[in-house]
Each structure stands twice: as C-alpha cells, then as structure tokens.
Image (cartoon, rainbow, N blue to C red):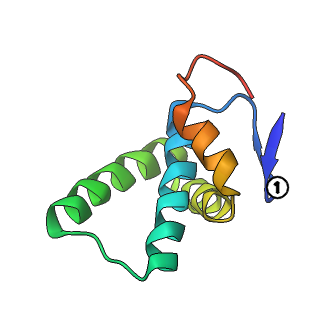
Amino acid sequence: MRSWDGVDQVPIRPDARGALLHGAADGVFELLEETMEPLEANLRAEGVAELEAHLGVDNFAARTSAGRDMPFDEVMALALEDGTKTA
C-alpha cells in the first residue's frame, strides 16, 4: 500500500491516479511559474470536472494536494504505470 500525505491508495484507481497526476502537474506549473494555454486549460477543466464527479470534490482536492507534494521519481513511476497494478 502506498500513501502520499495520508491519502491511501488501495488500489490506485484510474480516477485517483488522474487526480494525483493533476496535482503533480499543478506543482510543476507553479514551480516553473508557467500558465496553461487556453486550449490546455479548457481540456484540464473538463478532466477536473469529470474526476470530481467520480471522486467527490473533497477527495479530488486531497489527492491533487498529495500529488503536488509527490517526489518527481514517484510521479514518473505513477505516470508510466499501465493501470493494471495495484498499490
């Protein structure tokens, strides 16, 4: 079982994985002081709305926060997983 800032993953469902990766991406954008292009921002907003509907707003927020704080190597490992593994 993995845990990022107390957010337990049993197993990491695709929607939870997406929320973690959204948080990690947000952290990178903040670190680089970059903003998304309008098309990217619109696609992201659609994805966020879908994930919030599946996970619930509070759960999504907790997972994006955890993703924002994940070490880079863990983010990359999570991004490269094929989704068939359990945590």
Amino acid type shown at disc 1: Gly
Q: Residue at x 75, y 31 (%)?
A: 10
Query: Dividing the image into 4 quarters, which one contains the N terminus?
Result: top right
* Number of numbered labels in the structure image: 1
Viewer-proximal residue among 49 and 73: 73
Q: Residue at x 57, y 59 (%)?
A: 64
Mark 1 residue element: loop
Name the side, left or right, on which 58 lies relative to 6: left
The answer to whether 47 is drawn above or below residue 61 in the figure is above
Q: Position of residue 29 (x, y in %)?
A: 43, 72
Name the side, left or right, on which 9 lies relative to 76: right
Q: Position of residue 49 (x, y in %)?
A: 35, 54
Viewer-proximal residue among 55 and 86: 86
Q: Position of residue 34 (x, y in %)?
A: 36, 78
The answer to whether 82 is drawn above or below residue 53 in the figure is above
Name the side, left or right, on which 47 lies relative to 51: left
Residue 2: quadrant of the picture: top right
Residue at the limit of the structure toward the top, as seen here: 84
Q: Residue at x 57, y 28 (%)?
A: 81
Q: Position of residue 30 (x, y in %)?
A: 48, 78
The answer to whether 20 is drawn above or below residue 84 in the figure is below
Residue at the limit of the structure toward the left, as seen here: 39
Which residue does the numbered mark 1 point to in the structure image? 6
Query: Dividing the image into 4 quarters, which one contains the C terminus?
Result: top right
Badge 1, how many Cα within 10 Å: few under 14, some, many 20+? Answer: few
Q: Residue at x 33, y 49 (%)?
A: 47
Residue 41: quadrant of the picture: bottom left
